[in-house]
């Protein structure tokens, strides 16, 4: 027995992989709790730190967490669109770069962005107008929403006729562990401005998660992707057009989630288990003899299953 | 152990299998505690004698074999696998047949198995299991679900008879996953796991089967109801807190 246990003993590397799996599968806002449990099970700080150093950045980026800037000038989103070298993230609105401690999930430092980290004045006009519109929309639609507009390819384009990309990131999280409930809404919109045919193409990804765990564990995981397009116009007009497209799709998506919830009791959930039997009365446990009788008769007649 | 149970409360229920095997490999010394405290999704085998499927669990396992409730034989065959007494086996057969009818009326399909065994204090223990695949490729009548799994585990400890009454202690777990998916609204997936207990002192005049059956029926309805109303409801509330559906509410709810 002792030998067998030694053989089945995992290598440090395997333990780190398992620890990472748990961390990455943490529900929205719960990675710190999961980390505490994983740490106590591993009972080895080196292995835990290795797993945490690898898993936290991935978790923070996929969950688009927002962190307060240390100088209280706002929040920075942890997203690949704003990621720079050395755990630094750009906040385009304030033109600042925040240094992030992924495992502690805090900003440790902030500096003004360098010129080469920012877009050209031509692109910045589009970005800034869109940011203003999106900010208006997010303040209206998400009580705890944080949003940002980034420049992707073509940030140094100087004038009309060229292609460039912007990205809108919206993240709203609500953590209320005292009510055993956490949740998050993340949406990212890739926006391609096509200089040659004067169109703007949008690709959106929305992801909503919720976890309720008072004496149980129930989780919602919903995702949706969509596409749309509009005309390439002046910065202000583009901003209004794009933000109304985003508003429209996100409103529709919320309505479709509501519809999914509404159809649970009478259609979807019914395919797992009915509320009442097909007979619409409780099962006749006191009178199960009738079933054995029918069975005996059908057996005798040779019509049984 | 406390940390392990903490993790099981947080990891998405559809990953229970993976999470449990991960914990088992990290904590080999706690394997029996883990296996008894963490409910895992039910597996199924086919009885070679009757051709019927039966459900596997800790309660019909001996070494690496599982006893079928239909033929009373172990799969794969086991020389001296433990069997219930003749009297209890009779009750087990009767319970399996009746429970299959109950299951069909509520589930419109699915698989059920009942196992019984003697315990140490002159009573016995019965385990009622139901597994239903409600996806459109499985046994979902209405064809709404891309993925739909319901596993129910009911374990009833039946105490010895005392002046025509018996104590029944029921522990039930339901695990489920339901996923819908379509072009216009993407994928929508709810998964969950809850466990509850119920104790009752009942007259044996109606018979054990009748008493156990009623308790299970009441418990299953309660669990289904609280999943539907409370647990799913709470996740829906959360979505509405993240993004209050102002326009949607006006559009969709015409009442008063």
Image (cartoon, coloured by chain):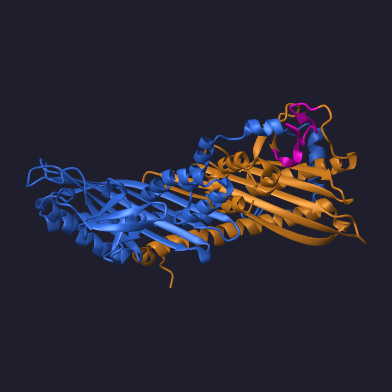
Chain colours: A blue, B orange
Tell me what residue is drawn at x 81 percent, y 51 percent.
B209
Instruction: Looking at this view, name the residue that lies furthest to the bottom.
Output: B256
**Between residues A36 and A304, which one lies in front from this camera angle?**
A36
Lateral position of residue A8 relative to residue A297, left or right: left
Residue A64: give x, y in percent of width and height.
35, 52
Tell me what residue is drawn at x 80 percent, y 57 percent.
B168
Instruction: Looking at this view, name the residue that lies furthest to the right.
Output: B163
**Between residues A245 and A268, which one lies in front from this camera angle?**
A245
Residue B62: in magenta span: yes
Q: Is residue B137 above or below residue B76?
A: below
Q: Quadrant of the N terminus of chain A?
A: top right
Q: Is residue A125 above or below residue B251?
A: above
**Between residues A142 and B6, which one lies in front from this camera angle?**
B6
Lateral position of residue B17 relative to residue B70, left or right: left
Residue A286: give x, y in percent of width and height.
80, 55
Residue A68: give x, y in percent of width and height.
33, 62
**In which quadrant of the rendered view does residue A146 lie?**
bottom left
Residue A173: give x, y in percent of width and height.
40, 60
Magenta residues (range): B56-78
Lateral position of residue B36 relative to residue A85, left or right: right
**Between residues B122 and A32, which one lies in front from this camera angle?**
A32
Q: Quadrant of the C terminus of chain A?
A: top right
Residue A256: in magenta span: no
Lateral position of residue A150 relative to residue B59, left or right: left
**In which quadrant of the rendered view does residue A236 lie?**
bottom left
Q: Is residue B219 above or below residue B18?
A: below
> In this rendering, does residue A55 appear at all?
yes
Tell me what residue is drawn at x 88 percent, y 40 percent.
B85
> In this rendering, does residue A293 appear at all?
no
Tell me what residue is drawn at x 47 percent, y 43 percent.
A51
């Amino acid at each position: 027995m002792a030998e067998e246990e030694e053989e089945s003993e995992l290598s440090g590397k395997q333990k780190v992989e398992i620890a990472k799996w748990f961390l990455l599968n943490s529900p929205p806002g719960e990675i710190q709790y999961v980390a505490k449990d994983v740490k106590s099970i591993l009972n080895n700080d080196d292995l835990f730190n290795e797993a945490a150093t690898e898993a936290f950045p991935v978790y923070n980026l996929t969950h688009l967490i927002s962190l307060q800037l240390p100088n209280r000038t706002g929040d920075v989103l942890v997203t690949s669109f704003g990621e720079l070298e050395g755990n630094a993230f750009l906040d385009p609105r304030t033109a600042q770069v925040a240094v992030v401690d992924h495992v502690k999930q805090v900003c440790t430092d902030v500096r003004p962005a360098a010129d080469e980290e920012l877009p050209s004045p031509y692109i910045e006009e589009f970005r800034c107008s869109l940011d203003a519109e999106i900010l208006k929309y997010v303040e209206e639609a998400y009580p705890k929403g944080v949003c940002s507009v980034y420049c992707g390819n073509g940030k140094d384009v100087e004038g009309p006729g060229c292609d460039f990309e912007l990205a809108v990131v919206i993240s709203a999280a609500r953590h209320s562990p005292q009510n055993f409930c956490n949740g998050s809404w993340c949406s990212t919109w890739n926006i391609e401005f096509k200089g040659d045919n004067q169109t703007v193409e949008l690709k959106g990804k929305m992801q909503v998660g919720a976890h309720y765990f008072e004496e149980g564990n129930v989780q919602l995981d919903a995702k949706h992707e969509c596409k749309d397009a509009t005309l390439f116009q002046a910065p202000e007009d583009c901003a209004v057009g794009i933000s109304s497209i985003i508003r429209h799709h996100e409103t529709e998506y919320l309505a479709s989630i509501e519809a999914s919830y509404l159809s649970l009791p009478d259609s979807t959930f019914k395919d797992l288990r009915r509320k009442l039997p097909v007979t619409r009365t409780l099962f006749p446990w006191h009178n199960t003899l009738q079933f054995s009788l029918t069975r005996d008769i059908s057996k005798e007649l040779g019509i049984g299953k | 152990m406390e940390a392990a149970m903490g993790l099981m409360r947080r990891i998405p229920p559809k990953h229970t299998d993976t999470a449990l095997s991960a914990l088992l490999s990290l904590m080999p010394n706690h394997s029996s505690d883990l296996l008894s405290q963490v409910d895992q999704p039910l597996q199924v085998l086919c009885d070679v004698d009757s051709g019927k499927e039966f459900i596997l669990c800790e309660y019909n396992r001996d070494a690496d074999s599982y006893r079928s409730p239909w033929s009373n034989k172990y799969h794969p065959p086991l020389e001296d696998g433990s069997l219930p007494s003749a009297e209890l086996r009779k009750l087990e057969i009767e319970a399996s047949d009746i429970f299959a009818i109950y299951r069909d009326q509520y589930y419109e399909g699915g698989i059920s198995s009942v196992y019984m065994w003697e315990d140490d204090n002159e009573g016995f223990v019965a385990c009622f299991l139901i597994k239903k695949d409600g996806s459109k490729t499985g046994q979902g009548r209405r064809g709404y679900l891309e993925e739909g799994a319901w596993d129910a585990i009911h374990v009833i400890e039946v105490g010895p008879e005392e002046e025509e009454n018996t104590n029944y202690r029921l522990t039930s777990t339901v695990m489920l996953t339901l996923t819908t998916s379509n072009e216009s609204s993407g994928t929508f997936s709810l998964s969950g796991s809850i466990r509850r207990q119920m104790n009752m002192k009942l007259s044996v005049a109606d018979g054990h089967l009748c008493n156990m059956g009623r308790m299970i029926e009441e418990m299953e309805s309660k669990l289904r109801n609280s999943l539907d109303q409370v647990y799913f409801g709470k996740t829906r509330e959360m979505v509405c807190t993240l993004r209050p559906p102002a326009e949607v509410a006006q559009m969709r709810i015409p009442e008063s």
